[in-house]
Amino acid sequence: MIDFGHDRIQIGHVNYFLSIYDGEHSNLVDYVKTYTERLPEGLLPVAYDDQGNLVVLKINGENKGKVYFWDHDQEGYDDYDPEKPEMGFVADNFDKFISELGKADSST
């Protein structure tokens, strides 16, 4: 479990980072096509955890550059509001997210 602080979400292990290539698995382009209607506008999937949840990067607007966690199990619930990605806030920017991953990995 990766704990990003008391005001941030805990996520499982990051299985893979998405990339642009012609392969079948962990392909960024395929993930964007699959999740474009399901994710709030302006969120780009960059990785996924061992439960199939996404780590996303806000690419525009007020919170541009911040990293969030998108829990696919919450999708479809009446009280789930996909317009509030701060419910899954992870880090202020991608560099901080990566540095926290390194800390978590070294302690296990």
Image (tube, rainbow, N blue to C red):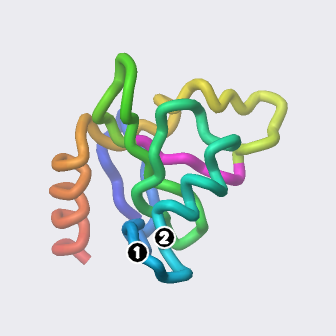
Question: Residue 106 location in percent, x, y?
Answer: 17, 74
Residue 48 horizontal/vertical position (percent): 48, 64
Is 89 placed above or below 4 here?
above
- Tell me the SS state at disc 1: loop
Looking at the image, the residue that sits furthest to the front is: 22
In this rendering, the count of numbered labels is: 2
Instruction: Give residue 67's position: percent from left, percent from top.
Output: 35, 42
In the picture, residue 92 is in which quadrant? top left
Quadrant in the picture for residue 77 = top right
**Mark 1: which amino acid?**
Tyr
Q: Is 39 a magenta residue?
A: no
Is residue 10 found left or right of 99 in the rendered image?
right
Q: Is residue 77 left or right of residue 51?
A: right
Q: Position of residue 21 (x, y in %)?
A: 40, 74
Amino acid at dot 2: Asn
Give the residues in magenta. 68-73
Q: Which residue is mark 1?
A: 21
Between discs 2 and 1, the one toward the N terminus? 1
Q: What residue is rendered at 29% in x and 41% in y?
A: 91
Quarter placement of the C terminus: bottom left
Residue at the spot of label 2: 27
For the residue pair 22 and 108, the one nearer the viewer reads as: 22
Which residue occupies 32% across, 35% down? 66
| Residue drawn at 35 percent across, 24 percent down | 63
